[in-house]
Amino acid sequence: MKKKKLSVVWGSLVILLFVIVAGFFYNQQTGSKTKAVTKVFSSSHIVKSSSTQVINQNAYLSAMGARATNQPLPVIGQIAIPNVKVNLPIFQDSGATQILYGAGTVDTDSIFGGANFALASHHVFDIAGAETYLFSPLTGSQIGMMIYVTDKTYVYQYKVDNIFVVQDTDLSVLDPVQGKQVITLIYCVNPSGPDRAIIRGSLISKTPFSETNPTVKGYFTADFNQVPADIVGILQHE
């Protein structure tokens, strides 16, 4: 009888161990994605994604000249939102350095003109001129506002049709939107806390850069609204 009871106990322990191990690997797969996106949406601690989308930056760099090549990381494109005076280089991946100097691609599948071209940058607080830097001016966004991005081969024009707030663990903002090609701009609502503001625009045109009208081309020659070099260090240590 004792041997029988002992075998039952051992059998139960084996089953319990299997459940624990299976649960561990399941959480590693499903939980890590949520954790990663939480970090991606953090204004101070955005992590670099392991992008699988190859983007040719050489053509952009040679066309844009010194302003692009003088950036701390290779530039793959540019975003211009004239209504709120946003004009920034776009970097591949959204690491801490990328979002200090411009906008970074968030999702591993982000591609110019793709299903959901997601970009993140800082909402700057507590320094002089904070409201003018990086994605801070997006607080003045309005429905119908135009967003332009270019890889210097094409200009992609989007029209803002949704502005909303999500929690930093909400993965759905990176999903494709049925029947649309969209851009998703992400920034923090306040210096600390889980809320992230989302500016969503739908693609309305894709035009070869050489055929783009001079007014739109001019948007990409305006000064970048980057944080001045002498105070970037303040953000790096926040």
Image (cartoon, rainbow, N blue to C red):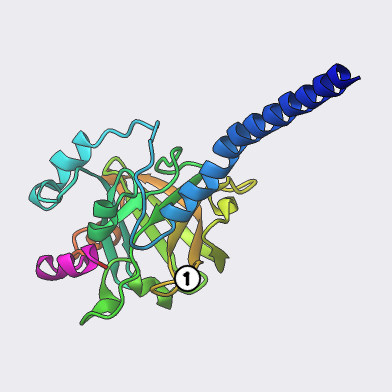
Q: Position of residue 76 (x, y in %)?
A: 26, 43
Principal secondary structure, stretch drawn in magenta:
helix
Q: Quadrant of the C terminus?
A: bottom left
Callout 1: SS: loop
**Residue occupied by mark 1:** 193
Residue range (magenta): 226-237
Q: Is residue 201 left or right of residue 137?
A: right
Instruction: Work out whether residue 151 or residue 2 is closer to the camera in this orientation and state it.
Output: 2
| Residue at image location 55% in from the left, 37% down from the top | 28
Q: Is residue 27 visible?
A: yes
Crowdedness near tag 1: few (<14), some (14–19) or many (≥20) residues, C-alpha within 10 Å: few
- Residue found at the far right of this picture: 1
Where is the N terminus found, in terms of image quarters? top right
Identify which amino acid the numbered label 1 is placed on.
Gly
Q: Is residue 74 above or below residue 26?
A: below
How far from the left and from the top, in percent, is residue 204? Answer: 49, 53
**Residue at the spot x=56%, y=68% of the render?**
164
- Residue 130 at x, y percent in the picture: 26, 77
Q: Residue at x 46, y 47 (%)?
A: 36
Q: Quadrant of residue 102?
A: bottom left
Q: Please state if 85 lies on the left or on the right of 11 as rendered.
A: left
Residue that extends furthest to the front in the rendered view of this protein: 2
The image shows residue 88, relative to residue 19, as above or below, that is below
Q: Is residue 155 left or right of residue 172?
A: left
Q: Is residue 160 magenta?
A: no
